[in-house]
Each structure stands twice: as C-alpha cells, then as structure tokens.
C-alpha cells in the first residue's frame, strides 16, 4: 500500500481490488486506487460497488462506456469520464441535477 497525501486529499494505492474495504471509507477527499489492466469495461462489474461514483477510462473507444452502462447497469456509477477529467464539474454531479436540487420551484394555480 502506498499513501500520498496533503491538506486537500489522500490517495491510497491498493495492490488489488480485494483490499478495498468500502465500509471503512470516510469520504472527505479519500481516494482508493487500484490499477487494473482490462480489455473490456465488463471486467469491472465484479469490482464495482454501489458506493463507486466515477469510472475514469483511457484507451477505450468512445462507444464502449455507453454500451457498458446499457448492458451492465453498474450500481452506483454516475459518471464515466476520460482520464484527467474526474474532478471536472458540470450541472449534473453524482447523478443529481444541481440546478434543480438547489433552486426552489413555485407553482401558482389560478
């Protein structure tokens, strides 16, 4: 296990997926990382958990992530993004439309 940290985040690199204990994960900028050489995103289905929000991909066709979501429906996964874009923010985050969640709608019926 290799740990790298600063005041903003902590990254823990694990040897394999069986070392992940999601019940001990505290959030707050903690990232558990594993390296998996796979030829298909389908090979991730046994590793993913409902607490896994984002998958970062590199070296796959642009069609493969959409096909993976449609065929496997992995629990918890809200985003699949290219390497380098995991912290890029948009109006939809973790499956929630932030503008809808943070605004008030008023209905007037006359």
Image: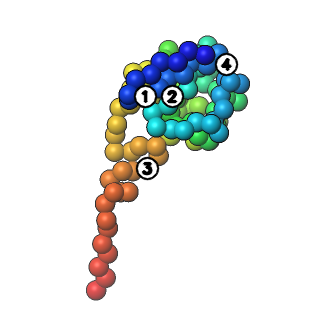
Identify the element where label 2 is drawn. Answer: strand
Disc 4 designates what residue? 16
Quick one: SS at disc 1? Answer: loop
In the depicted structure, whether residue 10 falls above or below residue 36: below
Find the distance from the CA under tag 2 to the CA under tag 1: 8 Å
Marks 2 and 1, the one that precedes in the sequence:
1
Q: CA distance from mark 2 to mark 4?
A: 14 Å
Give yes or no for contact between labels 2 and 1 (Cβ–Cβ under 8 Å).
yes
Looking at the image, is mark 2 or mark 1 nearer the viewer? 1
Tags 2 and 3 touching, CB below 8 Å: no
Q: CA distance from mark 3 to mark 1?
A: 23 Å
Nearer the observer, 2 or 61: 2
Residue at 34% over, 45% down = 91
Q: Quadrant of residue 107?
A: bottom left
Q: Going from the N terminus, do you reach mark 4 or mark 3 first?
A: 4
Disc 3 designates what residue? 96
Here the colouring is: rainbow
Whole-percent x, y for residue 3 in the image: 52, 18
- For the residue carrying disc 2, how many other residues have a C-alpha within 10 Å: few (<14), some (14-19), or many (20+)? some
Question: Looking at the rendering, in which quadrant would you find the C terminus?
Answer: bottom left
Judge from the rendering whether residue 19 lies leftward or rightward of residue 96; answer left or right.
right
Asked if disc 2 and disc 4 are in contact, CB closer than 8 Å, the reply is: no
Assess disc 1: are there few (<14), some (14-19) or many (≥20) residues with their C-alpha within 10 Å of its C-alpha: few
Residue drawn 31% across the image and 60% down it? 103
Percent position of residue 11, x then y: 49, 23
Q: Nearer the viewer, residue 48 or 39?
A: 48
- Closest to the observer: 12 or 74? 12
Instruction: Look at 59% across and 40% down and name the residue there.
Output: 51
């Amino acid at each position: 296990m290799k740990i790298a940290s600063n005041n903003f985040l902590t990254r823990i690199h694990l040897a394999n997926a069986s070392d992940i204990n999601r019940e001990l994960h505290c959030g707050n900028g903690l990232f558990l990382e594993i390296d998996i050489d796979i030829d298909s995103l389908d090979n991730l289905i046994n590793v993913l958990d409902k607490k896994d929000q984002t998958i970062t991909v590199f070296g796959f066709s642009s069609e493969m992530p959409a096909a993976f979501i449609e065929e496997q429906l992995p629990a918890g996964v809200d985003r699949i993004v290219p390497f380098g874009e995991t912290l890029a923010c948009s109006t939809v985050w973790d499956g929630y439309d932030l503008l809808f969640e943070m605004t008030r709608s008023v209905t007037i019926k006359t």
